[in-house]
Image (tube, helix red, strand yellow):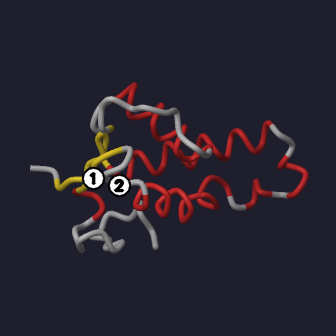
Amino acid sequence: MNLFSRRANKWGLNQESSRDLMVQLIEPVLFAGQNPIERAAISNLRQQGAVPLNLLVHQVASQLYRDELRNGAAAVDIGLFGASLFVPEVVKVIRERNEALWKIFQEA
């Protein structure tokens, strides 16, 4: 699953191309998120408003990667994988929390 390719990429959410999908925070947000992925996504969506799904996934995965490096993960060589190591879990959480914390919709 490569969310960053230029060709259409199906990831299982109503079979739309992921590059045409947008994510928007559902207001009001009643809590800050239960895990680091939710907190990072909420923070990004609060700052930027509606964001393309691919961009949100990239931003959240990059933030998680930087956080892990700060916490000493470089000692276990996650640097070989980079932020892409976190992409599958970020996609999973964003998909699972759709309609609870944010809304994923087709760009008009």
Dot 1: few (<14), some (14–19), or many (≥20) neighbours within 10 Å? many
Circle 1 sits in a helix, a strand or a loop, which is it? strand
Image location (x, y in percent) of residue 11: 36, 72
Image side of residue 89 versus residue 100, left or right: right
Residue farthest along the front direction in this orientation: 30
- Residue denoted by label 2: 98
Residue farthest along the top direction in this orientation: 47
Picture quarter containing residue 71?
A: top right
Dot 2: few (<14), some (14–19), or many (≥20) neighbours within 10 Å? some
Label number found at residue 104: 1
Q: Nearer the viewer, residue 82 or 71?
A: 71
Q: Which of 46 and 6 is in front in this view?
A: 46
**Residue at x 27% of width, y 37% of height:** 50
State how far apart marks 1 and 2 are (Cα).
6 Å
Residue farthest along the left direction in this orientation: 108
**Residue at x 48% of width, y 49% of height:** 58
Q: Which of marks 1 and 2 is in front?
A: 2
Q: Which of 98 and 41 is in front in this view?
A: 98
Image location (x, y in percent) of residue 4: 41, 60
Q: How many labels does the image show?
A: 2
**Residue at x 59% of width, y 59% of height:** 84
Image side of residue 17 versus residue 98, left or right: left
Amino acid found under the numbered disc labelled 1: Ile
Residue farthest along the right direction in this orientation: 75
In contact (CB < 8 Å): disc 1 and disc 2 = yes
Picture quarter containing residue 94?
A: bottom left
Circle 2 sits in a helix, a strand or a loop, which is it? loop
Image side of residue 63 versus residue 66, left or right: left
Image location (x, y in percent) of residue 27: 30, 31
